[in-house]
Amino acid sequence: MPVGTVASVKAVPQDVLEELGAQIILGNTYHLYLRPGHENVRKLGGLHRFMSWDRPMLTDSGGFQVFSLSDLRKLTEEGVTFRSHLDGSSHFFSPERSMEIQIALGADIIMAFDECTEHPADRNRARESMDLTIRWAARSKKYFEEHKTEVPWANDQRLTTNDQNLFGIVQGGMYPDLRRECAEKLVEIDFPGYAVGGLSVGEPRDLTYEVVNATLPHLPQDKPRYLMGVGTPEEIVEYVAQGIDMMDCVLPTRAARHGLLFTSQGKVNIKASRYALDEGPIDPECGCKVCRRYSRAYLRHLYASNEMLAQVLNTVHNLAFYLDTMRAVRQAIQLGDFARFLSGVRSRGLNSPAHT
């Protein structure tokens, strides 16, 4: 799922996202609450109409962004008081407030308000955070069930769906037994989908895999399982193998803005001088509009010249590569050939999807 933090996937217009085959994108509750404001978005018909995107959308709870403001927040049982990174003004998020904002934004999938546990965290700290997340999940669902009909597009027949889905988020730090306990209690609350949160917060990647493996057996197989905030192309294939259905990450867009491109032959740092006279495409196996038209030499020139087009083209390619990767994963699963596909990815040490 490409990340569109402020109702925009950076550098890429919505029609290009459609051409690339993006099925669902993300919006960020914290940022959209601060600017332009959830009530303004509601008055404009919700995020779909506001940003002219008729395909599904997901909004996060705002919990991770508030977590990242550790020096600007105060946590209580009721919620979190924090200061805006824009102007220092004081604000308050609770489970109920997060639901109110996300209902107003109108995404198809919204997330229960949680506390993202930092890393490292000792066992007592992880348990306290997990217990709070479970209590907040119950409060999130209660408010959501009482107010879900207030979504701005509830009666808009132009859209393919007319209800929101609230997902719970599993926390518990890096402790497998806490992850299991949190998952089981969230399943008792009963959500239509479940996310694994609190990872990619600085822990070693091997530990991320271990925590995911410890969590998934305790989540229903017949409901979506969403791993938040990951990862590289080869990592997302591994997470699919573990049983993850949905993922998001800023990496393809952020890396693109810094000149790092993902290809079937490994990462390409387009800033490198060796590409100054390279007439080949970024990835000879990629059929995206950038690889079909532009050379590595030209893309390097754009980046070195600080030309805005460099960020646009780099981002289009990286998103195309990620989305092609997931298409190849789905095709392998449908053909009953995923084990061989995964073995090939592992043997190369990088991702090499069948680009079309």
Image: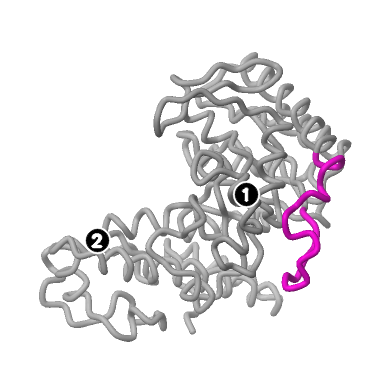
The residue that appears at 56% across and 70% down in the rendered structure is 22
Reading the image, the residue beneath label 2 is 269
The residue that appears at 59% across and 30% down in the rendered structure is 116
Is 146 or 141 nearer to us in this picture? 146
**Residue 114 painted magenta:** no
Is residue 241 visible in this depiction of the protein?
no
Q: Which residues are magenta?
A: 144-164
Applied colour scheme: one colour
Is 335 or 343 nearer to us in this picture? 335
From the top left corner, tell me how far across and down residue 93 is, in percent: 63, 28
Residue 185 placement: quadrant: top right
**Residue 158 painted magenta:** yes
Q: Main secondary structure of the magenta part?
A: loop
User: How would you rate the neighbour count of disc 1 (Cα within 10 Å): few for under 14, some for 14-19, many for 20 or more?
Assistant: many
User: How would you rate the neighbour count of disc 2 (Cα within 10 Å): few for under 14, some for 14-19, many for 20 or more?
Assistant: some
Q: CA distance from mark 1 to mark 2?
A: 31 Å
